[in-house]
């Protein structure tokens, strides 16, 4: 039995690693507001929305591992068992947390749509990166089986709306979103891992690489690595914006594909 009153097996299953790992039917009821509301409890004003808000705040500040029903009961000033009347466990809570933050990058004002699909991709990528920086715990979650709620679907709807002008087939439009998100998540994960390494070891990036300098210099002078030895001194400089470089190359690649598809559509006419 754990501190939260669950068995060890149940706790490990709902420990915050994968979405869709709890009671999917209950998660969907909570996400779409179709479930029965609990009767009035001892803590007026308590609701799934308040619980999710508190959980996101704890995860943002301390990581997903810090989120537990016991911790949230302390944050909300109520008994742990009171929370279970609204959300059955951490697995279902994770589904709600994910849906809450997934819609943030797509919070676009109706009167401020992207100028075209290129601007839509640019906005989507930057919004996703900002969201991952605000909520780095998102990078720790297995989202292969996401329980889709209204925020997630609204985000997808807005993303697809911005990409309609590409003239691609529907599976290709989903491919564009997956490609952009994968690029952003890879870069964000590298940055988050670097920050985590500094926090865990107390050793800065500068000190880490300075410790390796004598060995790397000898390796470059050995002649065993001629390509790397011939590279410019600023090759690995942090001044080079890898995000900007990769994003613009992605957009250029999609631009070429859009041109190919337009040519294919024109071909029968000629």
Image (cartoon, helix red, strand yellow):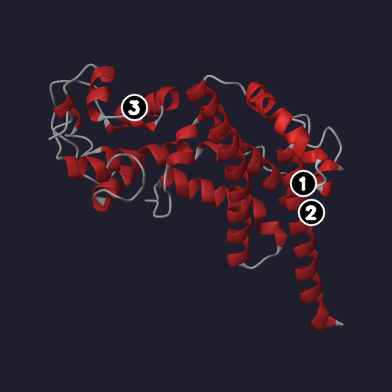
Name the residue located 15 percent from the left edge and 37 percent from the top edge.
Answer: 6
Dot 1 corresponds to which residue?
248
Query: Above or below — where is 187 with respect to 28?
Result: above
C-alpha distance separating marks 1 and 3: 37 Å
What is the x, y in percent for residue 37?
A: 19, 37
Q: Is residue 116 visible?
A: no
Q: Secondary structure at mark 1?
A: helix
Q: Secondary structure at mark 3?
A: helix
Q: Quadrant of residue 175?
A: bottom right
- Say which mark, if any, is on residue 252: 2
For the residues labelled 1 and 2, say whether their Cβ atoms are less than 8 Å apart: yes
Q: Quadrant of residue 91?
A: top left
Name the residue located 41 percent from the left edge and 40 percent from the top edge.
Answer: 98
Neighbour tally class for label 1: few under 14, some 14-19, many 20 plus, Cα within 10 Å: some
In the image, 62: left or right of 124? left
C-alpha distance separating marks 1 and 2: 6 Å
Name the residue located 28 percent from the left edge and 33 percent from the top edge.
Answer: 48
Neighbour tally class for label 3: few under 14, some 14-19, many 20 plus, Cα within 10 Å: some
Name the one closer to the observer, 70 or 198.
198
Dot 3 corresponds to which residue?
66
Instruction: Give the mark nearest the N terminus, 1 or 3.
Output: 3
Q: Is residue 4 visible?
A: yes
């Amino acid at each position: 039995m754990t501190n939260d009153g669950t068995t060890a097996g149940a706790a490990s299953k709902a420990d915050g690693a994968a979405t869709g790992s709890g009671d999917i039917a209950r998660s969907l009821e909570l996400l779409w507001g179709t479930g029965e509301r609990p009767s009035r409890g001892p803590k007026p004003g308590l609701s799934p929305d308040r619980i999710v808000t508190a959980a996101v705040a704890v995860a943002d500040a301390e990581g997903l591992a810090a989120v537990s029903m016991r911790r949230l009961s302390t944050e909300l000033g109520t008994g742990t068992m009171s929370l279970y009347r609204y959300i059955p466990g951490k697995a279902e809570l994770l589904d709600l947390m994910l849906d809450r933050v997934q819609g943030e990058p797509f919070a676009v004002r109706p009167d401020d749509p992207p100028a075209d699909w290129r601007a839509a991709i640019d906005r989507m990528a930057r919004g996703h990166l900002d969201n991952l920086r605000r909520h780095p715990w998102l990078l720790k979650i297995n989202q292969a089986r996401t329980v889709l709620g209204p925020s997630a679907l609204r985000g997808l709807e807005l993303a697809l709306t911005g990409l309609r002008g590409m003239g691609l087939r529907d599976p290709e439009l989903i491919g564009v979103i997956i490609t952009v998100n994968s690029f952003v998540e890879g870069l964000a994960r590298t940055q988050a891992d670097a920050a985590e390494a500094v926090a865990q070891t107390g050793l800065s990036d500068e000190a880490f690489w300075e410790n390796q300098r004598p060995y790397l210099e000898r390796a470059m002078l050995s002649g065993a690595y001629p390509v790397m030895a011939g590279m410019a001194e600023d090759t690995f400089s942090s001044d080079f914006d890898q995000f900007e470089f990769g994003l613009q190359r992605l957009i250029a690649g999609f631009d070429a594909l859009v041109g190919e598809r337009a040519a294919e559509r024109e071909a029968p006419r000629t």
